[in-house]
Image (tube, helix red, strand yellow):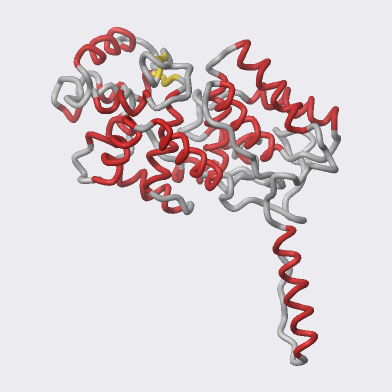
Amino acid sequence: MKACSFVSHPSLLIILIVSCLGVEVRAQLTTDFYATSCPTVFTVVRREVIKALMNEMRMGASLLRLHFHDCFVNGCDGSVLLDGSNSEKLAFPNRNSARGFDVVDAIKTAVENACSGTVSCADILAIAARDSVVLSGGPAWQVLVGRRDGLVANQSGANSGLPAPTDPINTIIAKFNAVGLDTTDVVSLSGGHTIGRARCATFTNRLFNFSGTGAADPTMDSTMASELQTLCRGGDGNATTVLDHNSADVFDNHYFINLLNQKGVLSSDQGLFSSDEGVAATKALVQTYSSNGNQFLKDFVTSIIKMGNIRPLTGSSGEIRKNCRVVN
């Protein structure tokens, strides 16, 4: 937004304030940003996401995760999609883990064919995340759009700022707070793990020698621990398991029911309920969401819209990339 200077004449001051407010309003994300410039964008994105999920249902979780990992680094600017030596794809939380880039490429191609040079890659991620949730049986919401794409990736920011599956709960809360999200957002957005899978490398710390005990994490259900030990023993860490056992492909509150029964896969998941750090707020929310699925879905929608508003580039900032992998 342009800077506004003070003037002495009252009528000129009123005009200037209105002018500045007008720039502020135009810079905000809206649901109808593409109503004239690309009215079919939501239909085009939905069609491509349907194709991707028909090919692999897990892709819904992957696209949702890309939106999450994008917004936590540099704000929601599509930086997670950039290739290059400083690529966020090469950061530890994303390496051999973040996926769905080829699907984003396909969506971008389809959108460009409909409306060339109009829709940002950052907005494509936000729309695809919503569609992934809806097509997995989750809630719908109106996606705010009007983001522009960033010009640089931030690999070091991805390494330091993204919540890790082995982070203590207080550390995760602090990382959320750093981007303007609160404890309710931590728990409701963690509920996105009701779909998707995790690699052994992200939870083997809980299976074989937890905290030097030579045994599994005592906050993990013993039967599940045994099953996961069999899956992960002697492998390269890339074998995967579902994050929400018995409800892997449906976006619901079953994830929280699992936490009550010590069936969270990641320590960052189970810690929301079983942490010894005294985070009473996360435990209370887990209990609420486990018994009230509608409250979880409502809070999830509020939180993901809030997350999608983390430092977006608007107006003349950034650009509209022609290829999501490289700047123009």
**24 sits to left or right of 201:** right
Q: Residue at x 39, y 45 (%)?
A: 184
Coordinates of residue 175 in the picture (x, y in percent): 41, 48
The answer to whether residue 147 is visible is: no
Q: Residue at x 27, y 41 (%)?
A: 284
Q: Quadrant of residue 220?
A: top left
Count of marks placed on residues: 0
Can you name the residue that lies furthest to the top here? 230
The answer to whether residue 262 is visible is: yes
Residue 12, compared with residue 235, is above or below; it is: below
Viewer-closest of 203 and 237: 203
Coordinates of residue 52 in the picture (x, y in percent): 64, 17
Coordinates of residue 153 in the picture (x, y in percent): 61, 43
Residue 25, compared with residue 103, is above or below; it is: below
Can you name the residue that lies furthest to the bottom here? 8
Q: Residue at x 79, y 79 (%)?
A: 15
Q: Quadrant of residue 126?
A: top right
Q: Residue at x 53, y 48 (%)?
A: 306
Can you name the residue that lies furthest to the left here? 213
- Which of the image's four quarters has the C terminus? top right
- Which of the image's four quarters has the N terminus? bottom right
Residue 99, compared with residue 296, is above or below; it is: above
**235 sits to left or right of 91:** left
